[in-house]
Amino acid sequence: MWKTLELDEAIHIIPIEDLRQHEESSKCWCNPSIENDLNKDIITNNSLDERELYETGCKKPH
Ligand SMILES: [Zn+2]
């Protein structure tokens, strides 16, 4: 599960209930990827449990 948090300056996409708490910032420990879309940055956090790899099919659950 992911949450999308839309703030004035950017949109943050953050994994919820990750193994470690994320900051709503591009300076988060997970080294988020930042894309520019229209007039806002989209800051996508990287989950510590690598859930995005499962969701995109790169890894299969055990
Ligand atoms: Zn993060």
Image: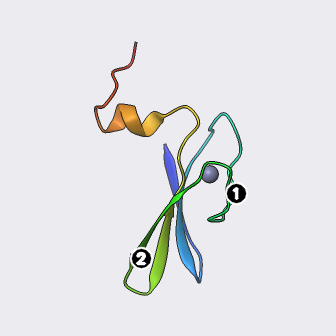
| Residue 22 pos. (x, y %) | 68, 51
25, above or below 32, in the image: below
Which residue corresponds to mark 1?
Answer: 23
**Residue drawn at (63%, 39%), measured in percent from left and top?**
17
Q: Which callout, 1 or 2, points to the residue nearer the camera?
A: 2
Q: Of label 1 and label 2, which has the lower sequence position? A: 1
Q: Amino acid at mark 1?
A: Glu
Q: Quadrant of the C terminus?
A: top left
**Residue drawn at (38%, 19%), measured in percent from left and top?**
61
Residue 20: quadrant of the picture: top right
Q: Is residue 52 left or right of residue 56?
A: right
Q: Amino acid at mark 2?
A: Asn
* Residue sticking out furthest to the top: 62
| Residue 47 pos. (x, y %) | 55, 41
| Residue 50 pos. (x, y %) | 49, 34
Q: Is mark 1 within 8 Å of ligand 1?
A: yes
| Residue 14 pos. (x, y %) | 56, 53
Assess whether mark 2 and mark 1 are in contact (beta carbons under 8 angstroms): no
Question: Alpha carbon of mark 1 to alpha carbon of mark 2: how far?
Answer: 19 Å
Residue 21: quadrant of the picture: top right
Which residue corresponds to mark 2?
Answer: 36
Q: Is residue 5 left or right of residue 39?
A: right
Q: Give the SS element for disc 2.
A: strand
24, above or below 1, in the image: below
**Residue drawn at (41%, 76%), measured in percent from left and top?**
36
Q: Residues within 10 Å of mark 1 (few under 14, many from 20)?
A: few
Q: Give the SS element for disc 1.
A: loop
